[in-house]
Image: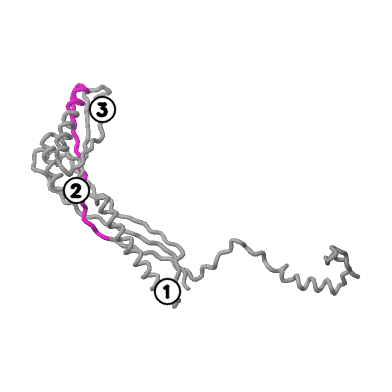
Amino acid sequence: MGLRNSVRDGKGWRSVATGMSGIAGVLALAGPLLLAPPARADATPDPRNRASFQVVVTREVQNDWATARLSATAEGKEPAQVASEVNGRIERALARAKKEKGIEVESGGYTTQPVYDANRIVRWQAWQEIRLASADVDRLSKLIGVLQEEQLLLSGIEFSVKRETREALQDELTLEALRKFRARADLVTKGMAGGGWSLIALSVGQGGGQPYYRAMRAEADMAMKTAAAPAFEAGKSELSVTVDGTIELD
């Protein structure tokens, strides 16, 4: 018993008979192709020789920027009266502060609100804030003392690393962290008896440098209004750079 099969020659397609032995030969040749799984275009290398690790570099730096918040408050029977009083104090404070070199001056929030007693308005309160910032902490401290004598209250002061200083230091820390990453990669390769390594993935992150904020207690603030200029210690901040990466051992 035989089957007919189609073949192509120089004259075109034609039908020929194929015996059982011929069919067996065809199946024998086609067997490996039938059994083999289809090739995947998105196949990825087996990551058996990969290692992932992290290095962190930190540095403690002196804070070189200070931001102080001062406010004026007033109370009275008439809202226009308390608003005028607060506005006058703030205007004088801004004019005085702008005379100082090296100090940035900015006006802040402003509110006027009623004070109730038994669901009845008994008086009004007004509040307004200004912010002063400088790299010269001593000059800023003296100005704060002057403004306190003019009935402004110091509500808090924030110490931080100036943006230009922070960016320059973070560049240095990034280079140092990358050097440490390469050294760690060499160490891992040596420990695993590898011949070398290739970089698969790398990420660099920066952290630290959060401002240190010192809030002033209300009673202490009131006592400082007629006192000498307050003394401040800027303190230090910690900057850090983190490098995460994956290598493949050769």
| Residue 223 seen in this snapshot | no
Reading the image, the residue beneath label 1 is 189
- Name the kind of residue labelled 1 in the image: Thr
Mark 3 or mark 1: which is in front?
Answer: 1
- Which image quarter: residue 78? top left
Asked whether the beta carbons under mark 3 and mark 1 sit within 8 Å of each other, the answer is no
* Residue under pointer 2: 135
> Foreground residue, 82 or 42?
42
Residue under the point 41% across and 59% down: 203
**Disc 2 element:** loop
Q: Determine whether 87 is above or below 5 in the image.
A: above
Residue 74: percent from left, percent from top: 18, 29
In this rendering, the label closer to the viewer, 1 or 2: 2
Between residue 90 and residue 75, name the one nearer to us. Answer: 90
CA–CA distance in space, label 3 to label 1: 68 Å
Quarter of the picture containing the N terminus is bottom right
Look at the picture and state if 102 lies above or below 4.
above
Q: Which residue is mark 3?
A: 113
Q: Residue at point 15% right, 35% down?
A: 152
Q: How is the image coloured?
A: one colour
Q: CA distance from mark 2 to mark 3?
A: 35 Å
Instruction: Give the magenta part as a residue range.
Output: 59-86
Left or right: 157, with 44 as reference point: left
